[in-house]
Amino acid sequence: EVQLVGSGGGLVQAGGSMRLSCAASGFTVDDYNIGWFRQAPGKEPEAVSCIRSGDGSTNYADSVKGRFTASSDNAKNTVYLQMNSLKPEDTAVYYCAADPYASRCELYDYQYWGQGTLVTVSS
């Protein structure tokens, strides 16, 4: 059974850093496309970053480019989202997702989802 368990959210001041983790089971993270998505209060969900299986190429939303880094650790079967220089507008529930066939960094392309973790950035 494919499962994703997210952790690492909480409250942080603007300008601070936080790392989100997503432990995977039932599959190997390097074999699946991995996505990070977020939904801010009152807003539509949006893609933050995706890691493509095979070549490990990563893309980022313009709003987080240069501040966030997505990575994976095959030995721990865990994926990470390192978030630096956080801004109040980064406040959202963050989700990790996985799919063996996702061809786009869009939430509807991803079948398996973690439970979400809240990140609150205070000004």
Image (cartoon, rainbow, N blue to C red):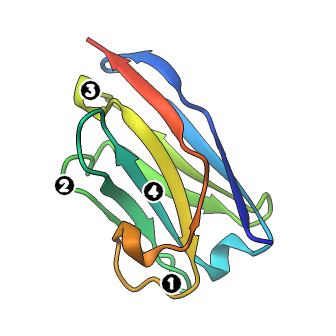
| Above or below 121: residue 80 | below
Mark 1 in CB contact with mark 4 (< 8 angstroms): no
Q: Give the label, 1 or 4, closer to the camera.
A: 4
Structural crowding at the residue carrying mark 2, measured as other residues with C-alpha within 10 Å and reported as few (<14), some (14–19) or many (≥20):
few
Instruction: Please tell me which of labels 3 and 2 falls first in the chain.
Output: 2
Q: Amino acid at mark 2?
A: Asp
- State the separation of the CA atoms marked 1 and 4: 17 Å
Q: Is residue 17 visible?
A: no
Q: Is residue 49 left or right of residue 22?
A: left
Q: Is residue 112 left or right of residue 28?
A: left
Q: Is residue 120 left or right of residue 5?
A: left
Task: From the viewer's side, name the closer residue of 89 and 54.
Answer: 89
Q: Which residue lies under the disc numbered 3? A: 87
| Above or below 10: residue 64 | below
Q: Give the label, 1 or 3, closer to the camera.
A: 3
Q: Amino acid at mark 4?
A: Trp
Structural crowding at the residue carrying mark 1, measured as other residues with C-alpha within 10 Å and reported as few (<14), some (14–19) or many (≥20):
few
- State the separation of the CA atoms marked 3 and 4: 17 Å
| Above or below 108: residue 113 | above
